[in-house]
Image (cartoon, rainbow, N blue to C red):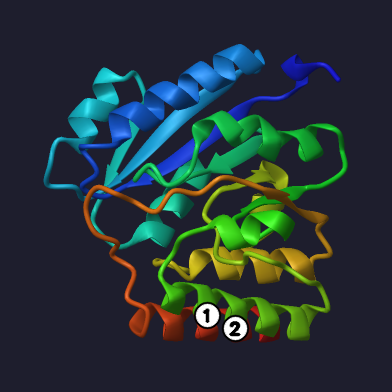
């Protein structure tokens, strides 16, 4: 497996994360340097009003600013700009460990999968994860619905830590602007019979700032996205 045959674009959506984004970029760069694979780091700033874009530029990331429209819109903007044949997405709040990016890449590089999801609930890891119970219940509902529609069992359909071949993304018509993007991507990938694999990851609930996910409003959008992505 020649790593020079691969180029990785790491897409990090950011909205007012000045206290964490610098560390995430540094750790991402260090990890991929050690992994010895060509890469780029793209920070898609979703209309931040803090120092997130300045800090990102200082850390030598490629920074693109868009009007504030949501996480999904920012990630889709990153997909359009990424030059890699593998795209990695991870959150900017410190909940994902950049050191685990190689785990996300391995299955794709070994041609065992086209799309990997970092699962917080994979096998023994499930009981170790500390997240709000409403989020855990919601995730189970979405997992069950996706499994019912597609016939594929997924343990963490809402994880934002992912790796996917760029040619797969090009074949998708993605429309989501918010948190429902993860569900839209997954359902459309399974409909396309893309090889999807899950790998266990660490997860740390954000300790700085407050989550912007609204369990009710975003939950309804996610449910709608799952159904419409399957039907249309």
Image spot of residue 182 (x, y percent): 55, 63
Residue at coordinates 61% horizontally, 29% vertically from top-left? 8
Which disc number belongs to residue 163?
none
Q: Secondary structure at mark 1?
A: helix
Query: Considering the numbered disc 2 on the image, is that residue within a helix, a strand or a loop?
Result: helix
Q: Is residue 215 above or below residue 77?
A: below
Q: Could one spot residue 165 in this view of the protein?
A: yes
112 with respect to 157 (left or right): right
Res 154 → quadrant = bottom right
Residue 84 spot, x, y in % from top left: 61, 31
Given this view, does label 1 or label 2 mark the residue nearer the observer?
1
Relative vertical location of residue 230 with respect to residue 101 in this rendering, above or below: below
Residue at the image point whose x is 49% and y is 17% from the top: 30
Q: Residue at x 50, y 49 (%)?
A: 203
Q: Which residue is mark 1?
A: 137
Q: Position of residue 183 (x, y in %)?
A: 58, 70
Marks 1 and 2: CB-CB under 8 Å? Answer: yes
Q: In the rendered view, does 52 fall on the left or right side of 188?
A: left
Q: How many marks?
A: 2
Q: Quadrant of the N terminus?
A: top right
Q: Quadrant of the C terminus?
A: bottom right
Taking 70 as reference, is 28 above or below it? above
Q: What is the crowding at mark 2: few (fewer than 14 residues within 10 Å), some, or many (at least 20)? A: some
Given residues 206 and 33, the one toward you in this image is: 206
Residue located 44% across and 81% down the image: 219
Residue 141 numbered tag: 2
């Amino acid at each position: 497996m020649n790593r020079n045959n691969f180029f990785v674009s790491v897409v990090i959506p950011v909205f007012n994360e000045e206290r964490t984004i610098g560390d995430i970029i540094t750790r991402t760069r260090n990890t991929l340097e050690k992994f010895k694979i060509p890469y780029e780091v793209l920070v898609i700033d979703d209309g931040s009003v803090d120092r997130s874009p300045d800090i990102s530029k200082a850390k030598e990331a490629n920074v693109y600013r868009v009007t504030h429209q949501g996480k999904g819109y920012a990630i889709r903007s990153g997909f359009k700009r990424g030059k890699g044949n593998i795209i990695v997405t991870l959150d900017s709040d410190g909940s994902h460990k950049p050191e685990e990016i190689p785990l996300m890449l391995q299955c794709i590089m070994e041609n065992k999968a086209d799309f990997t999801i970092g699962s917080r609930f994979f096998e023994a890891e499930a009981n170790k994860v500390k997240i709000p119970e409403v989020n855990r219940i919601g995730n189970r509902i979405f997992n069950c619905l996706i499994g019912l529609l597609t016939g594929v069992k997924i343990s963490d359909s809402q994880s934002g830590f992912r790796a996917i071949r760029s040619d797969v993304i090009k074949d998708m018509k993605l429309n989501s602007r918010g948190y429902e993007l993860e569900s839209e991507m997954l359902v459309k990938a399974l409909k396309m019979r893309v090889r999807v694999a899950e790998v266990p990851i660490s997860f740390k609930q954000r300790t700085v700032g407050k989550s912007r996910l609204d369990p009710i409003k975003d939950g309804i959008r996610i449910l709608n996205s799952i159904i419409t992505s399957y039907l249309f």
